[in-house]
Every structure is written in structure tokens, then in C-alpha cells.
Image (spheres, grey):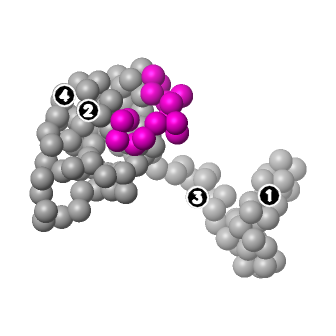
Amino acid sequence: MSIDKKPTLFDILDQIKFKTSKYEYNKKDASAFMISMFLSLDSNLIDIVNKINSLQFGLDDDIIYKYYMDKVPKGRRYLKWPKKDPKDKQFDKDVEQEMSEKGLSKREAMMVVKQRGKLNV
């Protein structure tokens, strides 16, 4: 176990992918939910993630981590986290504008922007 630095989500994912044990697993460093989200981006791992998905919130994160360590095949994976598309970025800008102009909460501003989009105003 390395004491030099605190492991990140990506360090934990590398442990799963390469079957190493450089860091001790701690759910504060990388929750099982985030590990599942990231692994589900690989179409070859979808079946593995789906099998544990229904139990995701009923099991301890340690158990899910051990499951992935056992089931995910060893090897390099090029997984890329998806970025927001321009439509989502515009939605966020519109929400911020509504919040600042009308003094709405984020939730209220999101509702206004969504309603405006449905009306095509």
C-alpha cells in the first residue's frame, strides 16, 4: 500500500483493470457507484456491471469493489468520460440567466427553462 498519496477514482479503476493492489480500497476515495458508472462506458463490461446494478445500493461498496476485482478481465481499457453536448451547455447558461435575472432557485429556473423549451418560445 502506498502512503505517499491519496488514491483517486482513476487509481482505483486502474487497480481493477490491472489486478494490482497498490492502494487499499476506501469508498471515500471512489464510491462503488462511480466505479460502476465508469466501467459501464465499456460495452464489453456492460453485462458485468448490469449483474451487480440491481444490488448497487443494497451492498457495501467493499463487496462491489471485490466483485469488480474478480469479474473484470485484466487488460488495458480506453474509457473516456462523456462530455456535455452543446445543447446541455446552453441549457445550463439559460438556467444561470434565469437565476440571476429573476432571483429564482436553481430548481425553479430549471423548470422555467424546460417549460420554455416545450413551448418553443
Q: Secondary structure at mark 3?
A: helix
Q: Nearer the viewer, residue 43 or 50?
A: 50
| Residue 105 horizontal/vertical position (percent) | 75, 71
Q: As displayed, is residue 61 above or below residue 74?
A: below
Residue at the image point whose x is 33% and y is 56% from the top: 29
In the image, is residue 51 part of the stretch drawn in magenta? yes
Q: Quadrant of residue 38?
A: top left
Q: Which residue is mark 2?
A: 69
Residue stretch rendered in magenta on the structure: 50-64
Q: Secondary structure at mark 2?
A: helix
Q: Residues within 10 Å of mark 4 (few under 14, many from 20)?
A: some
Q: Which part of the image, by quadrant, shows the C terminus?
A: bottom right
Q: For marks 4 and 1, give the one nearer the viewer.
A: 4
With 97 as the anchor, is 65 left or right in this view?
left
Q: Quadrant of residue 107?
A: bottom right
Q: Quadrant of residue 36?
A: top left
Q: Earlier in the sequence, mark 2 or mark 4?
A: 2
Q: For marks 2 and 4, give the one nearer the viewer.
A: 2
Q: Nearer the viewer, residue 55 or 41?
A: 55
Alpha carbons under labels 2 and 4: distance apart: 9 Å
Q: Secondary structure at mark 1?
A: helix
Q: As displayed, is residue 78 above or below residue 88?
A: above
Q: Which residue is mark 1?
A: 111
Q: Which residue is mark 4?
A: 74
Q: Amino acid at mark 4?
A: Lys
Alpha carbons under labels 2 and 1: distance apart: 42 Å
Q: Nearer the viewer, residue 3 or 34?
A: 3
Alpha carbons under labels 3 and 4: distance apart: 36 Å
Q: Earlier in the sequence, mark 3 or mark 2?
A: 2
| Residue 101 horizontal/vertical position (percent) | 77, 79
